[in-house]
Image: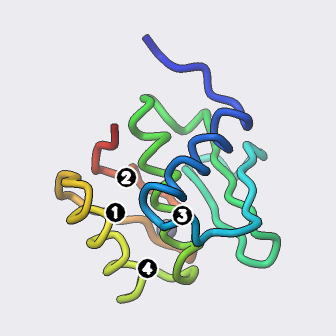
Amino acid sequence: MRTIWNEQRLQRLFWRYNRRFFGDALKGWTVDTDELHQGLYGCCNEKTRCISIRLPSHTSDHLVRSTLVHEMAHAATNSSHGRRWRSEIERLKAGEGLSRGGSRCTDGASSRLEPRWPLA
Ligand SMILES: [Zn+2]
């Protein structure tokens, strides 16, 4: 059965992941479901401290969770997919036993391609 996702649920999940994965280090961030370009999964805006998740792009609960973690890794590092961001993702995978596959999204902090690691 699919979860009904909305901003409240995403925000609660953000807080849970923030505690579990990031030691509550992400302060003052919010999550919204503002309409993003078609084809995008998510976006992380460092200026407004806002993570946007484009729900219609997602076909499963674990994809929604994966995108949220992907964007949270941007929030914890920067908007590129450079070394810092990649090592953050590796840390999350190693710490939580997430399966490999990684992320292949491009274009700054926007997620264009399906995130691949499953999250409980
Ligand atoms: Zn990204």
Judged from this view, the residue extending furthest toward the right is 48
Between the residue at mark 3 and the residue at mark 2, the CA separation in whole angstroms equals: 13 Å
Q: Determine which quarter of the picture holds residue 61.
A: top left
Q: Residues within 10 Å of mark 4 (few under 14, many from 20)?
A: many
Q: Is residue 83 above or below residue 15?
A: below
Please give the residue where the numbered disc 4 appears in the rendered image.
81
Between the residue at mark 1 and the residue at mark 2, the CA separation in whole angstroms equals: 5 Å
Disc 1 within 8 angstroms of ligand 1 (CB): yes
Residue 66 percent across, percent down from the top left: 42, 48
Q: Which mark is residue 38?
A: none
Q: Mark 4 vs mark 3: which is more N-terminal?
A: 3
Q: Mark 1 vs mark 4: which is more N-terminal?
A: 4
Q: Which mark is residue 103?
A: 1
Please give the residue where the numbered disc 2 appears in the rendered image.
115
Task: Please name which of the two marks, 4 or 3, marks the residue nearer to the observer.
Answer: 3
Q: Residue at x 55, y 38 (%)?
A: 57
Please give the residue where the numbered disc 3 appears in the rendered image.
72
CB within 8 Å, label 1 to label 4: yes
Q: Determine which quarter of the picture holds residue 46.
A: bottom right
